[in-house]
Image (cartoon, rainbow, N blue to C red):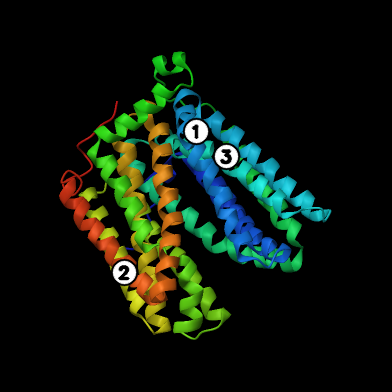
Amino acid sequence: MNNKKFILPPAFKHRRFVLLWLSMMISTAGSQMQLWALFWHLRTLSDQPIVVSGIGVARFLPILILSLLGGLVADMYSRRKVLFISQVTMTVISATFGFLTYFNVIEVWHMYVLTAVQAAALAFDMPARQALVPNLVPREDLPSAFSLNSMSFNIGSVAGPALSGLVIAGMGQSWTYFIDAISFIAVILSLILIGDVPQDINPLVRRQGINLEAIKDGVSFIRSQPIILSSMILDFFATFFSSANTLLPFIAKDVLRVGAWEYGWLSAAQPMGAVGVGLVFSQRSKVRKQGSLLLWSVAVFGLATIVFGLSTSFWITLISLAVIGGADAVSTILRNTIRQMVTPDAMRGRMVSINQIFFMGGPQLGEIEAGAVAQAFGTPMAIITGGLGCILAVVWIARQWPALPSYSGDEARPA
C-alpha cells in the first residue's frame, strides 16, 4: 500500500533560508497588523478621509526617491548587514510609535514623519532582502524559495489585520506598535544566526563608491534584458489596471448588500487563494515554460477581475477574489524567479530596486485610476474595465517582447 507523504519544499533543505523565512513571516504579520492599526489610529485622530489617504504618500515617496540608492547599496555591501541595519531602524520606529501612543502625545504629523522614515528604511531593506535569497539557496530551488516567501507574506496579510483588531480591543492601540517592534527582533536574531553570506561584489563598483554611474549601469542592464524589462512592465500594467482593493467595501455594501462579517471573508479571499497556490508551488523545484505561464497567470488575473466586477453573488465574488489571489501569487513567484535567474549576483540589488518602483507605483496609481473611473461610471465598471485593460496589456507585451512567452527558465545563467 502506497502512502503519499508530504514532500518537504526544496528550499526548506537550506537552514539559513529557513531561519530567514520563519522570521520574515513573523515580521510580516507584525507589519500588517501595524499598518491596519495605523489606518484605524489615524481615523481616531481625524475624521477627514484625506488624512488617512495621505499616509500612502508618506509610504511611497521615500521609496520612489531612495529605491535606486538602496539597490546600489545592496550590491556594494553585505546584504545581510544592510538588512540588519534596516531592521534595527524599523524596530526603533515602531517602538517610537508605541511610546508616543502610550503616553498619549502622538499627533498626525508624528505619524507621517515616522511612516516616512520607516519607508526610507524599507527602500534599503527590500532590495537587500530579495537579492539575499539567491545567496541562500541554489538556482534550481529558487522557484520553491520565492513561492514560500509569497506564501509567508500572504499568511501575514491574513493574520495581521485580524490581530490588529484583537490587540486594539484587548490591549490598546500602543501595543500594536510594540508587538510590531518585537516582530522585527525575530529577523534580527535570524540574521545573527545565519552568519556571513558570500555574494559577488563588483570590485570596480565598490571602489567607485555611491555614484550616479553605478545606478545608471543598473538601469542600462534592465533595458538590455527584454525578459526582465517586459516582466516589470507587465507587473506595472497588471497592478495598475486591476488594483481595485479600495473598491471592495463599495462592492460589499452597495452591490452584494452584505455586512461586516461577509466583508471580512471577502477581504481574506485573495491572500487565502495566494497561500494555497504558494503551498503547491513550494513543492516544485524546477518550473518549465516560465514565461508563458507568467503571461497566462496575469491573463487569468484579469479575467477573474472581470468576473469580480460583473458578479452580484457573494459566493461568486468570493471565488473570483480567491482566483485573483492565486493568479497573482503565480505571477509574483514567477516574476521574482525569472528576474533573479537572469540577473548576475553583483547586479541583483539594483535590479530589485528598479522593480520596486514598478511594484509600488502600479498599485498606488491604479487605486487612483480605479477611484476616478468608479466616480464617473460606477464601481462595477471601474473593476470590469480594469480587468479588460489587464488582459490587453498581456496581449501587447507578449507581442512586443516575444522573448518572454518563449522563455523556459534554463536559458540564462548569470555570472
Q: Is residue 4 visible?
A: no
| Residues at discs 2 and 3 in contact (Cβ within 8 Å) | no
Numbered circle sitting on residue 70: 1
Percent across and percent down for residue 249 are: 51, 74
Q: Name the residue under label 2.
A: 385
The kind of residue tagged 2 is Thr
Q: Name the residue under label 3.
A: 120
Residue that appears at 49% across and 27% down: 73
Q: Which of marks 2 and 3 is nearer the N terminus?
A: 3
Q: Which of marks 1 and 2 is nearer the N terminus?
A: 1
Percent across and percent down for residue 253 are: 51, 81
Percent across and percent down for residue 13 are: 42, 42
Q: Which SS class for mark 3?
A: helix
Asked if 61 appears above or below 138 in the picture, the reply is below
Q: Which SS class for mark 2?
A: helix
Q: Earlier in the sequence, mark 1 or mark 3?
A: 1
Tell me the distance, in whole angstroms, between the alpha carbons under discs 1 and 2: 35 Å
**Quadrant in the picture for the C terminus:** top left
Nearer the observer, 66 or 124? 66
The kind of residue tagged 3 is Ala
